Image (cartoon, rainbow, N blue to C red):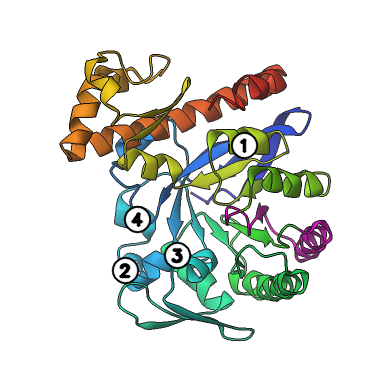
């Protein structure tokens, strides 16, 4: 059977908020969508079967980490990332640019060679050009591939951000050429430009000239305030192509997601629900819960009585508090799964309210609560 071509369609709108569907040969993804992060070919502390029970329809894999360990050839030998991790969901892989900036012990950016960096694990030297990043992602056989970009640290230096943006545009052209003809996969461009409106719009316009299947907003979640992030989205929301998915990389809190959906964003990823789950912080419809707090030792109610996944309501706050205070692995597993489930219930509610034309009311009810 022929593979289904990658496609995106909008089903409904409520002002800038969009209800849509991304079609892939591994299944359709309802948008707005949240992608749990599977950095090392696993969503930490969760099985794929449990992830699917939360309503998750796509996960994210990490090119940088997988090229270092276990190495792309080991994954390719078994048929790709889906077979390696026993996952039949669509997978998006990032290009590795952000990790080169944030994790590498030593890195150097070369216009032609790409990123030259030392592994944060053992110091081994790696070269990651735009072409190599695409080749790795194609060997991983992910369903959505990200172009190689340079992700600069937050700065108010206009010239530095402009130089970085131009380098990312040059790499975008090379990434598109290296990607070639793969109609059953999506290739996303990444908009850079820091906090500067003119640079963001210039980056977007030039990426649209190159033509991609989707457009991501990069260079955020690097220390800016929520107000600054929303300002960047406000600057470009009227310029983003209507017929392509819009992806805000590395974001974020439930409030971040609500505000970004209000500004036309369709896709999100963030380590927050899994990382918080491992450290005892739960997201609920009544706000955040630090389950390690002693006050929960006498609370026999479920973590979130509004949680629609009843299997997660089997465990009381009293019991979860005990698990964390005795360093039992089960505590991290349950709270991580709870947080992913909460994020997916949030996305489902967002989609429902966009469809019903009530998203603004839903946004206003929860923007300062979650």
In the image, what residue occupies the spot 61% across and 70% down? 150
Q: Earlier in the sequence, mark 3 or mark 1?
A: 1
Mark 1 Cα shell of 10 Å, populated few (<14), some (14-19), many (≥20): some
Structural crowding at the residue carrying mark 3, measured as other residues with C-alpha within 10 Å and reported as few (<14), some (14–19) or many (≥20): many
Residue 187 magenta-highlighted: no
Residue 39 vs 150, above or below: the answer is above
**Which of the pair 106/212 is nearer the observer?**
106
Residue beneath disc 4: 41
Residue 296 image label: none
The answer for how far apart the CA atoms under marks 2 and 1 are is 33 Å
Rendered location of residue 189, percent (x, y): 66, 60
In the image, residue 303 above or below residue 99: above
Q: Which residue is mark 2?
A: 69
Whichever of callouts 3 and 2 sits on the residue coming sooner in the sequence is 3
Q: Nearer the viewer, mark 3 or mark 1?
A: 3
Q: Residue at x 44, y 36 (%)?
A: 56
Circle 2: element type: loop
Q: Which residues are magenta?
A: 196-223
Q: Which residue is mark 3?
A: 63
Q: x, y percentage for residue 143? A: 51, 54
- Image position of 33 (left or right of 120): right
| Outermost residue, front side | 294
């Amino acid at each position: 059977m022929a593979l289904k071509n990658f496609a995106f369609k909008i089903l409904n709108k409520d002002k800038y908020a969009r209800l849509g569907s991304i079609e892939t040969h591994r299944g359709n993804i309802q948008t707005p969508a949240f992608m749990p992060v599977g950095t090392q070919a696993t969503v930490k502390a969760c099985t794929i079967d449990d992830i699917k029970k939360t309503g998750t329809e796509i996960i994210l894999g990490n090119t940088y980490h997988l090229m270092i360990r276990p190495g792309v050839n080991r994954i390719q030998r078994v048929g790709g990332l889906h077979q390696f991790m026993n996952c039949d969901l669509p997978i998006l892989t990032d290009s590795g640019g952000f990790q080169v900036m944030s994790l590498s012990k030593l890195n150097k950016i070369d216009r032609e060679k790409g990123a030259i960096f030392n592994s944060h694990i053992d110091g081994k030297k790696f070269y990651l050009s735009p072409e190599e990043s695409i080749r790795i992602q194609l060997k991983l056989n992910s369903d959505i591939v990200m172009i190689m970009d340079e992700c600069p640290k937050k700065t108010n230096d206009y010239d530095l951000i402009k130089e970085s943006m131009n380098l990312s545009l040059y790499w975008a052209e090379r990434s598109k050429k290296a990607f070639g003809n793969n109609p059953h996969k999506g290739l996303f461009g990444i908009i850079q430009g820091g906090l500067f409106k003119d640079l963001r719009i210039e980056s977007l316009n030039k990426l649209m000239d190159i033509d991609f299947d989707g457009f991501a907003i990069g260079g955020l979640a690097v220390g800016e305030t929520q107000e600054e992030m929303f300002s960047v989205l406000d600057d470009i929301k009227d310029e983003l192509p209507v017929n392509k998915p819009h992806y805000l990389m590395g974001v974020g809190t439930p409030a971040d997601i609500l505000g970004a959906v209000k500004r036309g964003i369709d896709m999100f990823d963030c380590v927050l629900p899994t990382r918080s789950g491992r450290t005892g912080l739960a997201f609920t419809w009544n706000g955040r819960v630090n389950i390690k707090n002693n006050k929960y030792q006498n609370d026999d109610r479920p973590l979130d009585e509004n949680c629609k996944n009843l299997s997660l309501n089997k465990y009381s706050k009293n019991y979860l508090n005990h698990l964390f205070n005795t360093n039992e692995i089960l505590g991290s597993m349950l709270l991580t799964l709870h947080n992913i489930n909460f994020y997916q219930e949030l996305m489902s509610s967002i989609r429902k309210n966009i469809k019903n034309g009530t998203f603004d009311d839903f946004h206003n009810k929860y923007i300062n609560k979650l």
